[in-house]
Image: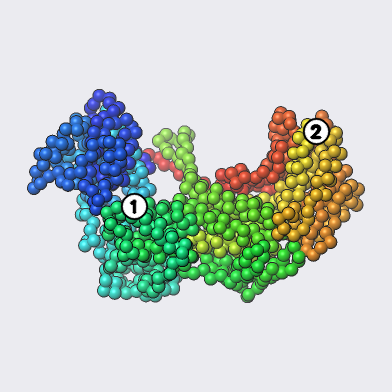
């Protein structure tokens, strides 16, 4: 957006309004609609006195929004049905207007013809808002013709009224880009309405300051087009697809471009251009005058221009006024009415009251009452959608849903179907494995999820996923192969480059992510139960952290969707020094994500939420041993309305799926959480293949320093949590505790006392502190780790053994007398093993040297009451996160990631978005 005195106008006659400075003017607002209402409100905020509002008479008993606002403020409101009769101004009307003593007339949007006796009367005359860049597109259908002509730039003009049709001198213009699939509604909501309000108020401000120009409109480039009405909006099929697309979107929603189909007038809405490629499957539909039949597909109705290129329309309005999804043309009349339950009847009763409050002119809302024929307007649609949200959180309507279900009965039936998950969209086919566990029935998908469908792996390959609590198989899971990866990447690429996701308004993308978070919350207990079965996480922790933080993460990044922006940069070296440089933050494309098994759902959320918020598509490989919450997430994403191809989930091995993602030329970014060894291999593969952008969150050996002046109770409690949280399967776990020598023995004694109280057992039991390790291989690794520590001479005070019960249970373990050179002091255990070393008090730099003597740098911590010491230590610790007098306190808004061989890049917080964005710099000389 920019305010401009267009270069083409600067050579024309230009005068300035001569006036003494007057910050408070007496203004008459002449017009109507929400736009007029907002201009009125902003003018009052600017300190101007509104001496009268002149608007249209009430329609069907409802006052115009401008009138409603002014009457609320006790401003005089006049509702003249006309200002002229037989070409002559009505004297009594003009007299009432003149009596207001207006110094300026402001016409933000006015459908009435105002006589020149009114236009010229005020001291400063009259200014008018017009939604085009004059002199182009004069006339009442300016926005329509901006789109019909395929203009790349649109905008608005505030001009001084004269006796011509939109010919008066220009005061102010602002312009915007016209997007390829803009409609009248989208460009109006995005730019012409909000910026038009600001621009009109700015114009008044210029007049008040005596700085308002009067730029004579040039004759060159001037156009005037007729008013678009239903009779002249029929589609001419003898033109290229782009011209047909422009005609349809230029008439969307009013008056609506139409053609004759099956002998009746059908109106087309929601057009978008289609990239060339193979035609989709569907049923042919003959359209009168078209060069070839259309194709009714799942996505909509594909139409063709005379150049053979295609466009897609999403919605159709039939001759009787019924709006339907274009993809349901051949089945639009097949759905039978559903019988309402008691709860659904109560909802219907609430909504009947809402309709009655909106349609105040209707005596009683009947099932046959038509929302729009009863006088509802577009602002009423917005209100109705919001009213439904308040009364039924699970019913997420779009404005189009109201337009497609205009009678009360149709509206209630549509809402109920949505609440039941039967809203007429193609049903998601899921082959569930069901289990009765944790006092509930859990329903688990177990196949790959590719392009919006659950499918078997290539060759029908499967494997068993194991419950670590008892070592038994939970179910068979599809095992992805290289061909499956290629299909998933192709689907993600198409969704990004050609699908709805790539064209979606960021705010709408955010709404979908919010909706996904809401669905996850509705299934929180089921997700936590599946997570506990598959990973061994204690159920209460899975509920709060594994799943709870996942929900928080999606909500957090949903809020970022429409707040991603670049910056404007002054550049000085280039000559001539008339340059503008700005940056744009753009999505990368197809992203591969590979996650570990310790927090299966949370690691998915940390990376995927940021990835999707940035506008990318994703192919994700969950850990082979913990795939079940990832495929359940895929089901919820589909039910939330995430378009096909945007999310793809591939359970499988790292050597096959992870390797192919690293090598694939169409994957432009890879995010990985796992071991340093695998991270190095991935980094090399990504470099060799196509120099992918990479972010790595790898191993850790995080030091925790506990000084003698600490709060001992808190240090013991947090120290234990730093090691034993999530049974030690925690990437930021404190791999080594350095305890000052004067409190070392007391600290160890307190820890031993607390360890005796820990309950190791069934993770579904709410009183359990410590569940099984994730899988057998990890349990064996922990046992070997502890055996090595004993061999090296460390003191094993407790644990180090497998618990004598089915499953993969390991006793929480405590080592002391650990020397810096020992294996267990250097290597990560990734389990519930506390390793304690002492240090001499008074030598802070020495303990810092020992703490930093590691190739890892993920997290660290310090406990002390001395704030100066705490700040000094936190500055010197070489780790991505430093906890002071706390531990494990991660938050969705705080960046998370490591240094050195713990990797690079960030999850969470605003920083995470940058991992999934690319920055483009644009420099313009003017």
- The 10 Å Cα crowd at callout 2, few under 14, some 14 to 19, many 20 or more, is some
Question: Is 771 left or right of 285, judged from the image as shown?
Answer: right
Residue 357, disc: 1
Please identify, in this view, whether the residue under mark 1 or under mark 2 is nearer the observer.
1
- Which color scheme does this rendered protein use? rainbow
| Residue drawn where x is 51% and y is 68% of the image | 428
Q: CA distance from mark 1 to mark 2?
A: 68 Å
Which of the 4 quarters of the picture holds residue 350? bottom left
Residue 876 located left or right of residue 339: right
Q: Is residue 899 visible?
A: no
Residue ranking furthest to the top: 20
Q: Which quadrant is the N terminus positioned in?
A: top left
Residue linked to disc 2 = 708
Looking at the image, which residue is at 35% across and 60% down? 403
- Characterize the local packing of mark 1: few (<14), some (14-19) or many (20 or more) Cα atoms within 10 angstroms: few
How far across and how far down the image is residue 50, in percent?
26, 34
Could you tell which of marks 1 and 2 lies nearer the N-terminus?
A: 1
Q: Quadrant of the C terminus?
A: top left
Considering only vertical position in the picture, is 57 above or below 502?
Answer: above
In front: 677, or 325? 325
Q: Which residue is drawn at the image coordinates 73% and 29% (left, top)?
A: 866
* Above or below 727: residue 921: above
Q: Is 811 situated above or below 116? A: below
């Amino acid at each position: 957006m920019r305010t401009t005195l267009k270069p083409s106008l600067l050579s024309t006659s230009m005068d300035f309004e001569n006036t003494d400075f007057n910050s408070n003017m007496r203004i008459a607002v002449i017009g109507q609609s929400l736009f007029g209402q907002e201009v009125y409100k902003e003018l009052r905020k600017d300190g101007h006195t509104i001496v009268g509002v002149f608007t249209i008479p009430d329609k069907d008993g409802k006052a115009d929004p401008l009138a409603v606002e002014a009457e609320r403020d006790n401003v005089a409101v006049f509702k003249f049905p006309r200002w002229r009769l037989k070409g002559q101004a009505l004297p009594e009307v003009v007299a009432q207007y003149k009596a207001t003593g207006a110094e300026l007339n402001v016409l933000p949007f006015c459908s009435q013809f105002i006589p020149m006796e009114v236009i010229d009367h005020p001291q400063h005359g009259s200014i008018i808002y017009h939604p085009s860049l004059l002199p182009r597109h004069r006339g009442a259908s300016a926005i329509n013709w901006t789109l019909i002509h395929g203009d790349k730039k649109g905008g608005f003009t505030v001009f001084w009224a004269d006796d011509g049709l939109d010919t008066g001198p220009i005061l102010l213009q602002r312009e915007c880009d016209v997007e390829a699939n803009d409609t009248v509604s989208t460009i109006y909501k995005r730019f012409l309405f909000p910026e038009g309000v600001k621009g009109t108020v700015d114009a008044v401000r210029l007049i008040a300051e005596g700085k308002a120009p009067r730029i004579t409109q040039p004759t060159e480039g001037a156009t005037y087009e007729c008013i678009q009405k239903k009779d002249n909006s029929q589609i001419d099929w003898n033109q290229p697809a782009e011209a047909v697309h422009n005609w349809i979107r230029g008439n969307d929603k009013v008056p609506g471009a139409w053609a004759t189909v099956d002998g009746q007038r059908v109106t087309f809405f929601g057009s978008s251009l289609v990239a060339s490629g193979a035609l989709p499957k569907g049923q042919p539909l003959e359209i009168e005058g078209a060069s070839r039949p259309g194709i009714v597909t799942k996505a909509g109705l594909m139409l063709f221009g005379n150049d053979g290129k295609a466009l897609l329309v999403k919605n159709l309005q039939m001759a009787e006024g019924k709006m339907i999804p274009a993809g349901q043309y051949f089945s639009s009349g097949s759905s039978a009415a559903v019988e309402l339950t008691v709860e659904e009847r109560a909802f219907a009763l609430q909504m009947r009251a809402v309709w009655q409050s909106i349609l105040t002119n209707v005596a009683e809302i009947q099932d046959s009452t038509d929302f729009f024929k009863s006088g509802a307007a577009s602002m009423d649609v917005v209100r109705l959608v919001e009213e439904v949200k308040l009364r039924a959180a699970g019913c997420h309507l779009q404005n189009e849903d109201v337009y497609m279900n205009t009678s009360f009965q149709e509206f209630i039936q549509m809402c109920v179907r949505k609440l039941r998950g039967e809203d007429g969209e193609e049903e998601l086919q899921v082959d569930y494995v069901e289990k009765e566990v944790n006092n509930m029935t859990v329903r688990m998908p177990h196949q790959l999820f590719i392009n919006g469908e659950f499918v078997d792996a290539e060759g029908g390959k499967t494997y068993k996923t194991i419950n670590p609590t008892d070592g038994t198989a939970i179910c068979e899971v599809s095992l992805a192969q290289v061909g499956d990866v290629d299909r998933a990447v192709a689907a993600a690429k198409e969704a990004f480059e050609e699908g709805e996701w790539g064209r979606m308004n960021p705010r709408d993308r955010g709404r979908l992510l919010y909706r996904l978070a809401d669905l996850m919350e509705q299934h929180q207990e089921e997700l936590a139960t599946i997570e506990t079965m598959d990973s061994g996480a204690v159920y209460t922790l899975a509920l709060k952290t594994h799943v709870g933080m996942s929900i928080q993460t999606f909500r957090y990044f949903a809020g970022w969707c429409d707040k991603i922006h670049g910056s404007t940069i002054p550049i000085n070296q280039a000559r001539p020094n008339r340059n503008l440089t700005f940056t744009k933050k753009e999505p990368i494309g197809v992203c591969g994500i590979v996650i570990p098994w310790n927090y299966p759902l949370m690691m998915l959320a940390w990376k995927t939420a940021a990835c999707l918020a940035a506008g990318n598509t994703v192919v994700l490989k969950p850990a082979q041993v913990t795939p079940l919450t990832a495929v359940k997430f895929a089901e919820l994403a589909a039910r939330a309305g995430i378009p096909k191809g945007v999310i793809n989930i591939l359970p499988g091995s790292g050597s096959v799926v992870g390797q192919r993602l690293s090598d694939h030329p169409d994957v432009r970014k890879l995010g990985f959480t796992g071991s340093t060894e695998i991270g190095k291999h991935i980094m090399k593969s990504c470099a060799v293949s196509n120099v992918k952008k990479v972010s790595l969150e790898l191993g850790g050996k995080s030091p925790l320093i506990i000084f003698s002046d600490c709060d001992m109770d808190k240090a013991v409690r947090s120290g234990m949590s730093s090691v034993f949280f999530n049974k030690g399967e925690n990437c930021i776990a404190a791999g080594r505790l350095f305890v000052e020598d004067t409190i070392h023995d007391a600290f160890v004694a307190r820890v031993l006392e607390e360890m005796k109280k820990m309950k190791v057992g069934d993770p579904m039991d709410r009183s359990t502190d410590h569940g099984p390790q994730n899988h057998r291989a990890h349990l064996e690794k922990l046992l070997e780790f502890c055996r090595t520590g004993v061999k090296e001479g460390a003191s094993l005070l407790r644990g180090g053994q497998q618990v004598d019960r089915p499953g993969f249970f390991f006793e929480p373990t405590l080592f002391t007398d650990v020397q810096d050179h020992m294996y267990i002091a250097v290597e990560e255990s990734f389990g519930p093993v506390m390793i304690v070393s002492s240090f001499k008090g008074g030598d802070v730099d020495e303990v810092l040297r020992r703490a930093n003597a590691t190739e890892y740098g993920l997290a660290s911590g310090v406990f002390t009451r001395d704030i100066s010491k705490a700040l000094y230590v936190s500055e010197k610790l070489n780790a991505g996160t430093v906890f002071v007098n706390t531990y494990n306190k991660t938050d969705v808004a705080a960046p998370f990631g490591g240094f050195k061989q713990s990797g690079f890049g960030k999850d969470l917080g605003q920083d995470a978005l940058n991992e999934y964005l690319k920055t483009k710099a644009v420099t313009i000389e003017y």
